[in-house]
Amino acid sequence: MRRRHIATAILTLFITEPAMAQQSIQITSQWGDVTAELADNDAARTLAERLPLTIRMSDHLRQEKTGDLPSPLPEGSRQRDFSPGTLGLWGSGDFVIYYRGGRVPLPGIVILGKVTGDVSIFDRPGEITIQLKPLAP
């Protein structure tokens, strides 16, 4: 009987809470292409609405590529830890692709998403221009 109640509760949750579609994007560069899944937050949704974008990025601390967005994104909750493949927002207009893991100082980063491909293509010194665009279905 208890299993039936649990199953009913789970089924009700799926019926009453609409599933959020995960937004996928493509990140292209002269070093290769990767895909990423955007986070479910206002900053990531706003980023998706502004695609396609071209961003000139430079290496920072041999852990990330960082570049300026054409206009700021909304603020959101921040965290300090990141892993390889994390897409983040440092300031309201500072887009970051982390190719190594680590921890940033306060106030932390807004998580924009996660690369699902091989992020190590960005693990090299120098500047790079990337294009962000919606992933074609």
Image (cartoon, grey):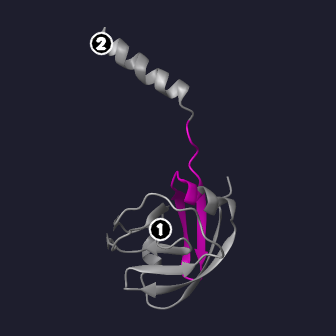
How many callouts does the rendering have?
2
Camera-side residue of 52 and 28: 52
**At 70% from the left edge and 68% from the top edge, which residue is drawn?**
52
- Residue 32 lies in the magenta-colored region: yes
Q: CA distance from mark 1 to mark 2?
A: 43 Å
Dividing the picture into quadrants, the one containing residue 124 is bottom left
Going from the N terminus, do you reach mark 1 or mark 2 first?
2
Which residue is under mark 2? 2
**At 49% from the left edge and 91% from the top edge, which residue is drawn?**
126
Magenta extent: 19-44
Q: Relative to 56, say whether 116 is above or below.
A: above
Residue 71 on image: x %, y %:
65, 73
Is residue 35 rendered to the left or right of residue 5? right
Which residue is under mark 1? 88
For label 1, count other residues whose C-alpha is less than 10 Å away and answer few (under 14), some (14-19) or many (20+). many
Residue 116 on image: x %, y %:
47, 61
**At 56% from the left edge and 86% from the top edge, which residue is drawn?**
128
Is residue 52 rendered to the left or right of residue 68? right
- Residue 77 lies in the magenta-colored region: no
**At 32% from the left edge and 15% from the top edge, which residue is drawn?**
3
Is residue 80 rendered to the left or right of residue 119? left
User: Dividing the image into 4 quarters, which one contains the N terminus?
Assistant: top left
Q: Give the amino acid type for the residue marked by disc 2 in the picture.
A: Arg
Dividing the picture into quadrants, the one containing residue 49 is bottom right
Q: Which mark is residue 63?
A: none
Q: Give the amino acid type for the residue marked by disc 1 in the picture.
A: Gly
SS under mark 2: helix
Query: Is there CB contact under 8 Å for labels 1 and 2?
Result: no
